[in-house]
Image (cartoon, helix red, strand yellow):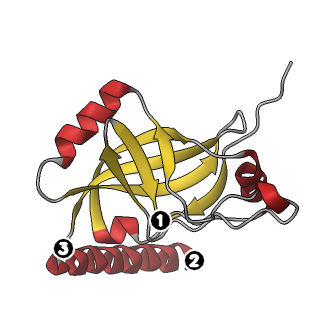
Amino acid sequence: MAQKRERKLISKNRSARHEYTIEETIECGIELAGAEVKSLRERAAQITDTFALIRAGECWLVGMHIHPYSAGGVWNRDPDRRRRLLLHKKEISYLDGKLRNRGYALVPLELYFNQDGRVKLLLGLGRGKKLYDKREDMAKRDVQREIERALKQRTRE
């Protein structure tokens, strides 16, 4: 019987939840070459300035940087090339309808290996935050941190 592994995080886009209010998340596959997968197993990729777009009925990931594989040689691809995201047609048409609304964007949140060892991307459908929304979220986090600190201090005594 094959042993299942747990989910292994490759890269996380920390600024995405700060810049966008994420309304929905979708897990999708990503079309990669063999040397790119080996490179991801070797070291992390960069997805902070990455976004997804829909063109001609296909979903593409733009701006993701995967470092060239150290033993790749001539099989290494361009590290910054566009990569196709593997989604069903219904999902693509649903996302395309949502993206036609003003202010929505497809933002990658996490890149990881799932339990079967395949590379998956957690894609978030989000709306851009205004500056006052960002300040409000930071104030809520600070208040929550103070509450947790006070409760922790109280339990120590």
Disc with the residue nearer the chain's start (3 vs 1):
1
Query: Is 88 placed left or right of 99 in the picture?
Result: right
Residue corresponding to mark 1:
63
Work out whether residue 14 or residue 46 is closer to the camera in this orientation and state it.
Answer: 46
Image quadrant containing the N terminus: top right
Of tags 3 and 1, the one toward the viewer is 1
Residue 62 locus on image (x, y percent): 44, 59
| Distance between the alpha carbons at the discs numbered 2 and 1 | 48 Å
* x, y percent for residue 147: 37, 75
Q: Which residue is mark 3?
A: 133
- Please report whichever mark, 3 or 2, sits nearer to the chain's N-terminal start: 3
The reply to whether the C-beta atoms of the residues labelled 3 and 2 are less than 8 Å apart is no
Q: Residue at x 24, y 76 (%)?
A: 134
Give percent across and percent down for residue 77: 68, 58
User: Seen in the image, is 49 located left or right of residue 31?
Assistant: left
Question: What residue is shown at x 30% (from left), y 79% (from top)?
Answer: 138
User: Which mark identifies residue 156?
Assistant: 2
How dense is the environment of label 2, judged by Cα within 10 Å: few (below 14), some, or many (20 and up)?
few
For this orientation, the residue located farthest to the top is: 1
Q: What amino acid is at disc 1? A: Gly
State which quadrant residue 42 falls in: bottom right
Quadrant where the image shows the C terminus: bottom right
- Which residue is the extreme one toward the left? 102
Q: Earlier in the sequence, mark 2 or mark 1?
A: 1
